[in-house]
Amino acid sequence: MTKIIGRKNEVKLLQNALNSNKSELIAVYGRRRVGKTFLIRECYKQHLFFEVTGLFNGTMKDQLSNFSRELSKVKGRGQQEISVPSGWLEAFSLLEQIIDKVRSKKKKVIFIDEFPWLATAKSRFLGAFENFWNHYCTKRSDLVVVICGSAASYMVQKIVNNKGGLHNRITQKIRLMPFDLSETEQFLKYNGIRYTRYDIAQLYMAIGGIPHYLDKVEKGMSVVQNIDSLCFEKDGVLADEFDRLFRSLFDNSEKYLLIVRTLAGFNRGVTRQELIDKSGISGGGDFSWKLTELIESGFVSESPFYKNKKQLSLYRLSDEYSRFYLKFIHANQGNGAGTWQRLFKSQSYISWSGFSFENLCLKHIQQLKRALRIDAIYSLNSSWFNKDAQVDLLIDRDDNIINICEMKFYNTVYTIDKKTYKNLQNKIEAFQRDTNTRKNIFLVMITTHGIKTNEYSNELVQNSLDLNSLFED
């Protein structure tokens, strides 16, 4: 049996649907290659009654033909072929007839994968599906209908935020995100690959926690060799994934790409207004929708400003592969084997990796809180900045403490020298002065290999965490 790595909460939700006393409608969405189909098939392999996958760029006729072909495969139909229905109302009516012939009251899973691709122009697919759910499935107690899609704009607007026939009908939604560092480590070990956590972090900062990408990592090759092979060699799996990725996820992807490329130019994030000004996109409702969809898809993250000043929230390009592609792959395409072995020693990479490590920490705040033993204390995460200083992660706690987190990616134990000491001291004083907070300020250093104890660290640092803290399960 294939092992499901991580996904504990998602598996629990899916299993609960099998044990409920009513029919369930589950929407699963997330970016391409994140493992949605694998998760559903593995969780429901003993209960799958009908499965169909939309065809990318298929016509309505193609989709209906594929649907009828899958209907013909349903257990108990024998070799009898089903004629291609004239439209989606008829197609779902045929599915209903097949379900009605089954006497078993056990839960049956209907899995519609790449749901948005079935909804071709003028096909009225969504209306037919709404009718199938509202007028057939809800009258039964033995169905689990799973609709799944990578096309974020469709899944967010038409399903998650549906104002029509599916409004408040979704009984469970699962936004499937990439693996975290702990899950990535487990996945690599499952494939027989054992890297140090420092190496796993470097790999993650380049390709992220996307299972499909991680599955292409070759056993017996170093991280540098694998990145070279995947991203820079001719026919490398990730050499030209970027454009395909956005075309498959977003209709009219040009504006999404413009937002992403703009954010890629700012390591520390930008405010909404700065993003509008830099990208040249009008800041109306269309821009807001596109930014929301990029956030929902896991490409962009929003860091609220201290005390929730909305206009000062910072937006970052948080998808590792996209950041890596725009920084290194795009400019070095076609350079062949050995490209990354040369680039990863450059000052450009050293600088880039520092900011990438900060993004990595921001994705693992819950792990950091567990390592600090404050996960049971109510707290709010935010950023803060003024003209003199910036803090990318503040943890404002209910026990009268604010943690200011400083993140450093270094290939050995990190030493706080006099210059760094003054910079950190300035940060703390600027924050206290600007906010007038009466809370205690605790400085947390988050580094790859810990910090060296000296007079500066003894005076300033209350907590020191190393890379292992990000792997807290």
Image (cartoon, grey):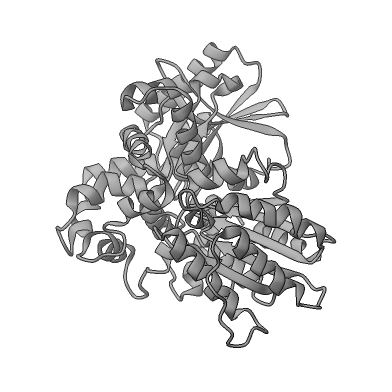
Compare residues 86 and 350 and report the one nearer the observer.
Answer: 86
Tell whether 236 sits left or right of 306. left
Tell whether 386 sits left or right of 439. left
Image coordinates of residue 215 in percent, x first then y, are 42, 69
Compare residues 452 and 387 and report the one nearer the observer.
Answer: 387
Which residue does the image show at 30% across and 34% down from the upper left?
Answer: 265
Which residue does the image show at 21% across and 64% down from the upper left?
Answer: 233
Q: Is residue 441 visible?
A: yes
> Which quadrant of the rendered structure holds the N terminus?
bottom right
Q: Is residue 13 above or below residue 454?
A: below
Image coordinates of residue 255 in percent, x first then y, are 35, 36
Compare residues 124 and 159 and report the one nearer the observer.
Answer: 124
Compare residues 449 and 128 and report the one nearer the observer.
Answer: 128
Tell whether 159 sits left or right of 313. right
Give the residue at the far right of this rendering: 21
> Which quadrant of the rendered structure holds the C terminus?
bottom right
Q: Is residue 66 above or below residue 265?
A: below
Q: Which image quadrant is residue 85 in? A: bottom right
Image coordinates of residue 3 in percent, x first then y, are 59, 74
Give the residue at the far bottom of this rendering: 79
Q: Is residue 80 above or below residue 130?
A: below
**Count of marks placed on residues:** 0
Give the residue at the far left of this rendering: 335
Which residue does the image show at 54% across and 65% down from the upper left?
Answer: 37
Q: Is residue 5 visible?
A: no
Tell whether 78 sits left or right of 347. right
Q: Which image quadrant is residue 223 in? A: bottom left
